[in-house]
Amino acid sequence: MILTAEGLEALRSQLIVSCQAYPGEPMRDPRTTGQVAASAVIGGAAAVRVQGLADVQFTRAAVEVPVIGLWKDGHDGVFITPTLRHALAVANAGAHVVAIDGTRRARPDGLSLVETIAGIHAESHALVMADCGSFDDAAAAVQGGADLIGTTLAGYSGERPKTDGPDLALLAEIASANLGKPLIAEGRIHTPAHARQALDAGAFAVVAGTAITHPASITGWFKGAMHA
């Protein structure tokens, strides 16, 4: 299945579930990622987002919904699919959409965001999701050819404060500008109410991850509330 820009319309007002585990955790296994993704689809996820080449491959075999793939390399600065090489590897692993760092920061390979997006489009069938940290990032990503824009890096790129929940103000600002590409709400969406608020703020679709697929964090929230 090749996902087209027109095909993205099926994701309007839908839930996308991010299925990721951190290195060293028991669930950090591509087979487990695929199983978690399949479980999320049973619950109603219209697409899934996964990290790692093997995870993309196993998830593609496990689900029939669009797979948004990424490759985290590092922990600081530009580390979400940071170079064109990373992006093409994710596309070749089978991702329908490649999520990349969509900020205006310098990239490790020296390519601009525009050059990276153009390279992905030229050498693969994958669409590009730009993970942005601010309105200016989103505007630049759309101008640079991104197929989707997300608020993934809001509060993490140094341009905006980290909000307790989703950055609804940023979502509303981007939505009101009508940049012409699907706006995906992502980042700190920890409750169903947050997801509803994100749609109401103008999001095209919503990504939830930790609150659904990361047992260690969810357990910690319960324990913290019980012993506060």
Image (cartoon, grey):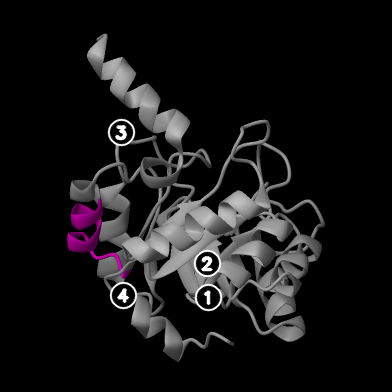
Picture quadrant where residue 117 is located: bottom right
Between marks 3 and 2, how big is the CA–CA gap?
A: 26 Å
Between marks 2 and 1, how big is the CA–CA gap?
A: 5 Å
Q: Give yes or no for contact between labels 4 and 1 (Cβ–Cβ under 8 Å).
A: no
Q: Give yes or no for contact between labels 2 and 1 (Cβ–Cβ under 8 Å).
A: yes
Q: Look at label 2 and name its amino acid.
A: Ala
Q: Percent from the top left, x then y, of residue 178?
A: 31, 75
Look at mark 2 in the image and give the residue it sits on: 140
Look at mark 4 in the image and give the residue it sits on: 178
Q: State the residue at coordinates (77%, 63%).
A: 111
Q: Is residue 131 visible?
A: no
Q: Look at label 4 and name its amino acid.
A: Asn
User: Camera-side residue: 108 or 63?
Assistant: 63
> Neighbour class for label 1 at 10 Å: few (<14), some, many (≥20)?
few
> Neighbour class for label 3 at 10 Å: few (<14), some, many (≥20)?
few
Between marks 2 and 4, how big is the CA–CA gap?
A: 13 Å
Look at mark 3 in the image and give the residue it sits on: 164
Magenta stretch: dominant secondary structure: helix
The vertical placement of 107 against 165, above or below, is below
Look at mark 1 in the image and give the residue it sits on: 143
Q: Percent from the top left, x then y, of residue 162?
A: 39, 35
Q: Look at label 1 and name its amino acid.
A: Gln
Between marks 1 and 3, how big is the CA–CA gap?
A: 30 Å
